[in-house]
């Protein structure tokens, strides 16, 4: 078994666990920084280690198109290429095919699309998605799934549930018959915001008895409450002894609710994308560093933060770096934001250990979201 | 005395020294990474320390326009703003006024120009150049000088020599009458490629008995041999006991010749600019990392290099980062190039100590410049 989850403590439905991988044990719930094209934008592996990153995510869609899975393999695999010796998870490419690629042709066999980079025609099947992820060499790999848009009619979502379940079976088949470094295959639940479809999807993929399960098709515009409506059933739908991964969710409020519903793993580009946009996340909300009010501010970005940026640079200095378009601004605020997520997840784990999550969560939310009705929106990139 | 140079060893006219500053002692000859706008592009202060950077340079012109010298002062000064506790040198702004700014009006009092950032009209005088550098707080500050273009007629160069000498005197006056943290003022020799003007310029500024002297107006298109023609007289023109700084020169071949002529200090954007352009410097020449031949190359950029990039990333991985426009590519190759310069200067210092520079230099040049007649040109940015 390439992956083992030990549940160390529960607090309500929240779980404090240790996930043992071929590359060491990591602590759950955890947040995975995203290295879309094989690099967490602007941050070195050393800096990621120092800020407490445990598992990185890389995108199969981007890597299969450039530099190509074979090239990654010739460069020694993804860990060697990224210079990251901790665990890595790759998605299957499905999500990006459905959100980024042009001129898709979708049938039961797979999906054919035009590369957004050079227009080349590429086919991704459940089998090839596994083969490609074998070549990349991540520790956790994902099934190919169909990802309908957030506003798809229920019939289309139902079709995606059925097709994704069939594809999960085919991925498992291919995964079992290929001989490669120990990699744990996760299936993905679909079903949009429809409770009955979510239940059906879960039932079909759980029957495959895979090492882990992901919840897909959320954070696509349905809103916090609709997301919660799905997540509140997760604990009963997915097996207790296996890791549960909520894909693409990174808003702290959503993470907190999802942990309380029994989710163990998260990923999102939010900390690095906001870092590049001069938005810093803190326990008391977002700091927009381009704001002129910080120009002469000699204090740290966040008094309570121990990250490299907060220990060394003032708000005024960080603002200057962004105004002068210096690369160091995005790097430093990305480091801060990733450190914030690591600290946030550590606080969540501690609260579960202490049995205080239900009491801590509303206090944290009140500080982070002073206007309780509004999610703090991102500035456009 | 804010600055003291101890000559530890000589080898021909080359000098191995220790320069003691209020922020510690540094070893000469040395190369100063350039932090134009208060940041060495893409590289953190921690990374600069790790790769052996000793002194950083920052540009008064850029900083006075943005964020402004007063803002830098309110943020605790340049060291605090840049998070660099080692020595910093600031230029006077003169060079950039003459190369970047528009609509200059030049007279004996100073130079008035339009900011290239917002079009604001700004005046820089010898006195204000000192005041601004007082506010920035660098350890070594430069006089305001007139920098004629490389193709200026001799009469214009002669005028610049005279005016720069007068301005050096005014800078000294202002420097003596202002009470501020210990800062060492350097005067700048001008004179283009004209030996008589260089001699006149040196005589006039050396008479001022300042803590150090710079050679300006070279590396402006005159070519390697013409530069050498000027430098061969430097040892007789500038005082032996004070540091000599050749401004803006960074081609390794030029550095080597200049050290052999008696120069102690260098600065250049070459390592970081080339780093952003995917060009790595090595002892055996430049590696152009965008070249398709490196796509599947799993070996390090430079076998003999101990920098963070070479210890962790393959040529293929670095090429991929540039092809995918990932910020980490420029950061890693900038680190490599700065490390190369630090190692190159350390090798020069060791050769002076061993008395072998005259023998080592041609061997190094043969490896670095396989085509002896051609400087390796930079790719355009």
Image (cartoon, coloured by chain):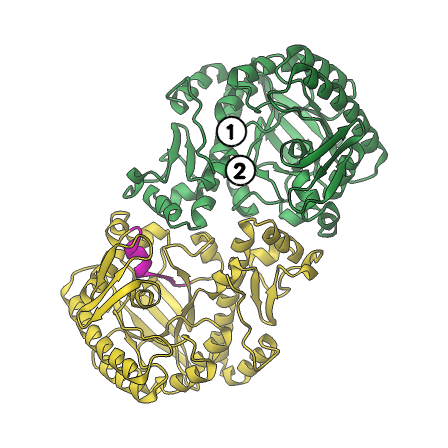
Chain colours: A yellow, B green
Point out the stretch of residues depicted in magenta.
Answer: A54-67
Q: Which residue is mark 1?
A: B346
Judging depth in this view, the residue of A356 and A338 nearest the camera is A338
Residue B250 visible in the current orientation: yes
Q: Residue A295: x, y in percent?
A: 69, 56
Q: Which residue is mark 2?
A: B52
State the residue at coordinates (29%, 86%): A197
Residue B313 visible in the current orientation: no
- Give the secondary structure at mark 1: helix
What chain is tagged by disc 1?
B
Q: Residue B52: x, y in percent?
A: 53, 38
Q: Does residue A61 belong to the magenta stretch? A: yes
- Give the secondary structure at mark 2: loop
In the orientation shown, which residue stands out farthest toward the right? B177
Q: Residue B29: x, y in percent?
A: 58, 26
Q: Residues within 10 Å of mark 1 (few under 14, many from 20)?
A: some
What chain is tagged by disc 2?
B
């Amino acid at each position: 078994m390439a992956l083992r989850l030990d549940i160390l403590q529960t607090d309500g439905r929240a779980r404090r666990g240790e996930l043992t991988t071929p590359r060491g044990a990591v602590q759950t719930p955890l947040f995975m920084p995203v290295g879309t094209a094989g690099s967490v934008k602007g941050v070195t592996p050393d800096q990621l280690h120092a800020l407490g990153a445990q598992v990185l995510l890389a995108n199969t869609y981007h890597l299969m198109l450039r530099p190509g899975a074979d090239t990654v393999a010739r460069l020694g695999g993804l860990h060697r290429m990224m210079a990251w010796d901790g665990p890595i998870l790759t998605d299957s490419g499905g999500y990006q095919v459905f959100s980024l690629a042009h001129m898709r042709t979708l049938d039961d066999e797979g999906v054919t699309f035009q590369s957004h980079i050079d227009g080349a025609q590429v086919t991704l099947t459940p089998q090839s998605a596994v083969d490609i992820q074998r070549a990349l060499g991540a520790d956790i790999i994902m099934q190919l799934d169909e990802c309908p848009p957030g506003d798809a009619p229920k019939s289309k979502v139902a079709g995606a549930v059925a097709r994704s379940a069939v594809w999960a079976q085919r991925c498992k088949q291919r995964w079992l018959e290929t001989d490669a470094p120990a990699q744990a295959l996760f299936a993905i639940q679909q079903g949009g915001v429809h409770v009955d479809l979510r239940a059906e999807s879960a039932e079909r993929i759980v029957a495959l008895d895979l090492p882990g399960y992901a919840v897909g098709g959320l954070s696509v515009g349905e809103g916090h409450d609709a997301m919660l409506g799905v997540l509140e059933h997760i604990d009963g739908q997915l097996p207790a002894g296996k890791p549960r991964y909520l894909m693409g969710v990174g808003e702290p409020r959503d993470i907190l609710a999802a942990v309380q519903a029994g989710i163990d793993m998260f990923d999102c580009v939010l900390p690095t994308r906001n870092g590049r946009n001069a938005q810093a996340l803190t326990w008391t909300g977002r700091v927009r560093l381009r704001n002129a009010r910080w120009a002469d501010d000699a204090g740290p970005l966040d008094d309570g933060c121990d990250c490299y940026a907060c220990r060394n640079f003032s708000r005024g200095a960080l603002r200057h770096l962004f105004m002068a378009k210096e690369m160091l601004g995005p790097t430093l605020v990305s480091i801060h934001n990733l450190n914030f997520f690591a600290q946030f997840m550590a606080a969540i784990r501690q609260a579960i250990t202490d049995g205080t999550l239900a009491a801590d969560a509303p206090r944290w939310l009140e500080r982070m979201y002073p206007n309780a009705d509004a999610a703090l929106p991102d500035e456009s990139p």
